[in-house]
Structures are given as C-alpha cells and as structure tokens.
Image (cartoon, helix red, strand yellow):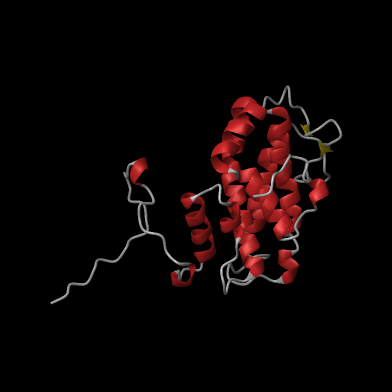
C-alpha cells in the first residue's frame, strides 16, 4: 500500500539556522495559489541565482503585466532597505548634506508638502517610506492580482525616485556599493527592469550598466 508523501511546508520555522532557511524545493509559478504568488516566485528566482537578471524579470505565462511590475518594485524597495541601513553607518548627514549623484545632479525630496533639499540619508529614508506607503495603499493598489492602469502609472515615479539611491551610493560610497552589488546585482537588475518595462529611459540611468 503506497503511502502519501508529507506536504511541503514553505515556511521558515522559528529558531531555524541561517544555513537551513528556504530549504524547500522550488515551485512552478502555475502551482502557486496564493495571492502573493508573484512575490514568492520573484524571491524564489532571486534566491536561486541573483545574477540571472533575465530569468528574474521574465514574466511567467498568465501573469498580469501591471501586477508583475508592481511586485518587482515592492521587492526592490524591500532590498533597498539594506542599503538604507548601511547608509546610517557610512552616509554622514554632515558630509552628504544633499542627495546628489554626479556634480550635475541634486535631487529634491518629494516627501514634503513642498519638495526640498534633504541630506542623502534622510532622502533615502523618506523616499523608501513614501514608496512603501504608496505600494501598500489599499486606495491605489487594493489587489495584487489585477492593477488598474491609473495605479500602474504611479510605478514610474516611484522607480525614478528610488533609483537615486543607487546613484548616490555609486558616486559617493563606491566601496559599499561595489560590495553590495557584487552579491546582489540589485542595481543591474533594477536598470534592466525599468528599461524592459518602460519605466525609465536609458538617458536617466547614470550608473554604468552592462546588459546581461
């Protein structure tokens, strides 16, 4: 008599060791039934190989494109929090008094009633906070399965603002940037993402970018 195999539990148990995290087998997107399937699939691809940018960005069959772009942007904001933490150690507000990249670019912080200059650290924290508030807004994004065109149009603005975090890190904290990028390929993936889905133009990508 055949015995049924135990169901796979895709969840990290409390107290699990770091080396044992996410040790369950991969799952096809078509088999994911959760409303967070897009997020789960993207994270699965990143864990498998963060350098395989094309595979991570490739939209699976049957996925709504606006939702796919939305889930990726949420993921970018999530990963950028790591840079924000490192900025608190390396990006001194007394030194980086403005959010700059090259000498040609000074960015105003849009988190205020009237956009104004902030230190690079404050700009980063404010921008990620505003992005998280928007992307988690039930008013603009009540569903993660289907997204209205009017809401999807907001993604481009979010992408442009969070890209400035990459540009500041690259031009002013290069050692930290190179260390982070070598293990995550986050800026490379972001650049490929905004070009693939027409959220930014190539002219606005001021961090050197090599296609896969």
Direction bottom: furthest residue: 1
Image side of residue 196 versus residue 52, left or right: right
Along the line of sight, the residue nearer the viewer: 77 or 101: 101
Q: Quadrant of residue 116?
A: top right
Direction right: furthest residue: 104
Image side of residue 92 versus residue 2, left or right: right
Residue for point 61% across, 64% down:
68
Direction left: furthest residue: 1
Location of the N terminus by quadrant is: bottom left
Q: Position of residue 209 (x, y in %)?
A: 71, 43
Q: Position of residue 85 (x, y in %)?
A: 58, 35
Q: Tell me if residue 148 can be seen.
A: yes
Residue for point 32% across, 45% down:
16
Direction top: furthest residue: 94
Q: Quadrant of residue 169?
A: top right
Q: Is residue 160 above or below residue 37?
A: above
Q: Is residue 198 above or below residue 87?
A: below
Image side of residue 164 versus residue 176, left or right: right
Q: How many marks?
A: 0
Q: Is residue 150 above or below residue 56?
A: below
Q: Position of residue 11 (x, y in %)?
A: 37, 56
Q: Position of residue 113 (x, y in %)?
A: 80, 47
Q: Tell me if residue 36 can be seen.
A: no
Along the line of sight, the residue nearer the viewer: 43 or 109: 43
Residue for point 48% across, 72% down:
30
């Amino acid at each position: 008599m055949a015995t049924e195999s135990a169901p796979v539990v895709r969840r990290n148990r409390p107290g699990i060791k770091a080396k044992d995290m996410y040790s369950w087998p991969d799952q096809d997107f078509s088999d994911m039934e959760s409303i967070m399937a897009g997020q789960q699939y993207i994270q699965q691809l990143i864990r498998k190989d963060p350098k395989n940018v094309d595979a991570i960005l490739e939209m699976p069959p049957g996925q709504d494109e606006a939702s796919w772009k939305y889930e990726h942007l949420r993921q970018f904001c999530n990963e950028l929090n790591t840079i924000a933490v490192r900025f608190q150690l390396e990006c001194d507000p007394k030194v980086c008094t403005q959010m700059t990249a090259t000498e040609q670019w000074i960015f105003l912080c849009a988190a205020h009633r009237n956009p104004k200059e902030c230190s690079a650290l404050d700009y980063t924290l404010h921008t990620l906070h505003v992005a998280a508030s928007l992307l988690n807004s039930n008013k603009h994004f009540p569903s993660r399965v289907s997204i209205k065109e009017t809401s999807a149009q907001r993604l481009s603005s979010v992408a442009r603002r969070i890209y400035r975090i990459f540009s500041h890190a690259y031009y002013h904290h290069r050692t930290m940037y190179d260390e982070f990028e070598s293990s995550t390929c986050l800026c490379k993936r972001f650049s490929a993402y905004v070009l693939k889905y027409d959220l930014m133009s190539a002219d606005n990508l001021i961090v050197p970018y090599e296609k896969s």
